[in-house]
Image (cartoon, rainbow, N blue to C red):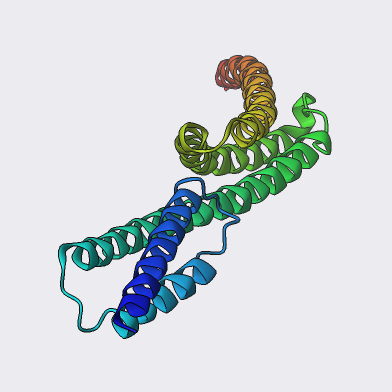
């Protein structure tokens, strides 16, 4: 009986050690899709087996098994936490990317529906209103510059830790967004330049009219004084 018990425990020891090695390998090769809860459950079951079957054993072999269990468990928890944080970063990237894409679509729609710049002197107030509205739009662009910087920073972080295919997807997504973003900035700057030109041209006409008014007023005053 004693011999059978020794053989049984040795066989169980080998099985547990082998399974721990398999779990360790699985953890090392794990991805964000790995179900760590199942691995933890299995490790807890193995821990229960060890405490149950090797309660009275305290030899070096059992000590080594217990230490191996602790090491595998720690690596599993650490890798699980790392992948959880990675999953959260990926979810944050997708949410931020969607939010930024929505803003880009809204900005493109805004620029596409803008009325032509009002250059008629009689509608100078309309021109000033267009300037104010565009300045408000540009202020919003300044705010979203930080959003894009944060998105870019997150994408760079993910590119270095994700598998190649996922990294390529992240890079392509960011490149597409960046092209749209740069195009919006360029269009906004061009419209602001045109608005400034229109304002300067209108002010030039106003200055000329004012100079003519002053001249007419001066001549009128002089003629009136001469008659008196």
User: Residue placed at 16% from the left, 68% from the top?
Assistant: 59
Residue 214: quadrant of the picture: top right
The answer to whether residue 47 shows anywhere in this view is: no
In the image, residue 197 above or below residue 85: above
The percent coordinates of residue 205 (x first, y second) are: 67, 17
The answer to whether residue 109 shows anywhere in this view is: yes
Image quadrant occupied by the C terminus: top right
Classify residue 27 as left or right of residue 62.
Answer: right
Image quadrant occupied by the N terminus: bottom left
Classify residue 108 as left or right of residue 196.
Answer: right
The percent coordinates of residue 202 (x first, y second) are: 67, 21
Residue situated in front as seen by the camera: 139 or 120: 139
The percent coordinates of residue 46 (x first, y second) are: 41, 74
Residue situated in front as seen by the camera: 13 or 141: 13
Classify residue 109 as left or right of residue 181.
Answer: right
User: Residue placed at 23% from the left, 67% from the top?
Assistant: 62
Q: How many marks?
A: 0
User: Residue placed at 48% from the left, 51% from the top?
Assistant: 86
In the image, residue 221 above or below residue 30: above
Residue 135: quadrant of the picture: top right
The percent coordinates of residue 145 (x first, y second) are: 51, 37
Residue situated in front as seen by the camera: 218 or 5: 5
């Amino acid at each position: 009986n004693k011999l059978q018990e020794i053989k049984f425990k040795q066989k169980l020891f080998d099985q547990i050690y082998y399974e721990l090695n398999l779990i360790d390998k699985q953890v090392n090769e794990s991805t964000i899709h790995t179900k760590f809860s199942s691995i933890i459950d299995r490790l807890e079951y193995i821990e229960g087996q060890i405490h149950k079957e090797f309660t009275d054993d305290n030899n070096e072999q059992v000590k080594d098994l217990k230490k191996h269990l602790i090491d595998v468990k720690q690596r599993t928890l650490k890798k699980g936490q790392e992948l959880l944080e990675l999953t959260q970063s990926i979810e944050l990237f997708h949410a931020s990317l969607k939010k930024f894409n929505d803003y880009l679509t809204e900005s493109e729609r805004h620029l596409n529906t803008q009325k032509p710049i009002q250059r008629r002197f009689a509608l100078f107030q309309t021109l000033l209103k267009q300037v104010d509205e565009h300045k408000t739009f540009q202020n919003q662009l300044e705010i979203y510059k930080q959003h894009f910087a944060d998105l870019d920073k997150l994408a760079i972080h993910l590119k270095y830790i994700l598998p190649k295919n996922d990294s390529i997807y992240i890079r392509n997504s960011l490149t597409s967004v960046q092209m749209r973003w740069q195009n919006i900035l360029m269009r906004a700057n061009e419209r602001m330049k045109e608005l400034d030109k229109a304002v300067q041209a209108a002010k030039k006409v106003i200055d000329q009219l004012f100079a003519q008014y002053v001249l007419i007023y001066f001549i009128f005053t002089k003629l009136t004084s001469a008659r008196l």
